[in-house]
Amino acid sequence: MTLTATRPIHPGDAAVRSVLVVANPVAGGFRYRALERFAGRLDDLGIRCEVVLTRYAGHLTEIARGLDGRHDALVVGGGDGSINEAVQGLVTLGAAAPTLGVLPFGTANVLAHELALPFSPVAMADLVSDGATGPLHLGRVGGRPFVLMVSAGFDGDVVHAVDAATKRRWGKLAYAGAALRLALARRGRDVVVEADGRRITCRLAVVTTARFYGGPLTITRATHATRPGLRLVTLADDAPGTLAKAAVALGLGRLDRLAGVSDVPVEKVRFLGEGIRMQVDGDRMDTDHGLVEADPVPLRVFRREVD
């Protein structure tokens, strides 16, 4: 497969000369040593590298929005939530947006798995130096960009049940514990999905740009973040037994074979329902009944070749 960029290529653009690395020092999984090794390797490769640590919520978005062309790449040290923050700023730059890179040290790192990125900072620096890029296709919910997915129902309930401190301390185990408690409590709500003129009532609904979910788990085999288009994955029932089967099917990459699961292409979706909770790219979001659709303009992202 040939790796291609999504922005116009000008003479000299293929070479990465200057990189800005931004990370949140209070995020779960933060590793200052990884930043040092990444920056040191870039220096060895003759690439200028500036490291900035964010100081408050939304700072990463401000930094990305304010990039002035001095850097060829913006590398985010963190997880999917941090990447989402950066993308909210990058999309405002249009064709002037630098290439996005990811130095993974978040909780799930779904995008890192999706792009087959190395988790070694030295290997990631080498990948940036090699300049292998591809398109990163985004979605939007109510006008807000997302990188991987937006969902409602049981999935959203779990994300809302985990506070930031518990997430930092326990990582994925915090979500597993919350999912178990909520499943046994049987307090789910119906999600009404309006999708391309159809109406579906379910207990969990995910609109995704990506193949992976929760890390290296396959939610759908019919798309990828480097390809255009959205998929709608729904689960009709959230009984404990059904959720247990869904978890096993996710681990095996066979969720689409489970009874009660629907996996279809979509263009325009709305999530409705009384009291539903939503999440975007693994973080809580206020319930938004706005339109979910694909963003027509992809970003450029460093990645390894994927099938």
Image: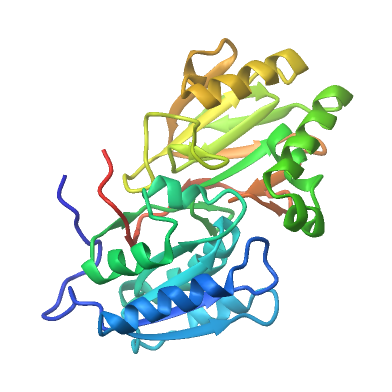
In front of the other: 256 or 141: 256
Task: Name the residue furthest top.
Answer: 259
Task: Name the residue furthest left.
Answer: 11
In front of the other: 170 or 10: 170
Q: Position of residue 255 (x, y in %)?
A: 51, 21
Q: In which quadrant of the rendered view does residue 32 lie?
A: bottom right
Q: Position of residue 44 (x, y in %)?
A: 29, 82
State left or right for residue 84 relative to residue 272: left
Q: Position of residue 206 (x, y in %)?
A: 58, 35
Instruction: Identify the residue at image location x=74%, y=53%.
Output: 167
Instruction: Identify the residue at image location x=42%, y=81%.
Output: 20
User: Can you see residue 92?
Assistant: no
Q: In which quadrant of the rendered view does residue 17 lie?
A: bottom left
Q: How many marks?
A: 0
Above or below — where is 13 with respect to 200? below
Could you tell me which quadrant the N terminus lies in?
top left
Instruction: Identify the residue at image location x=54%, y=13%.
Output: 258
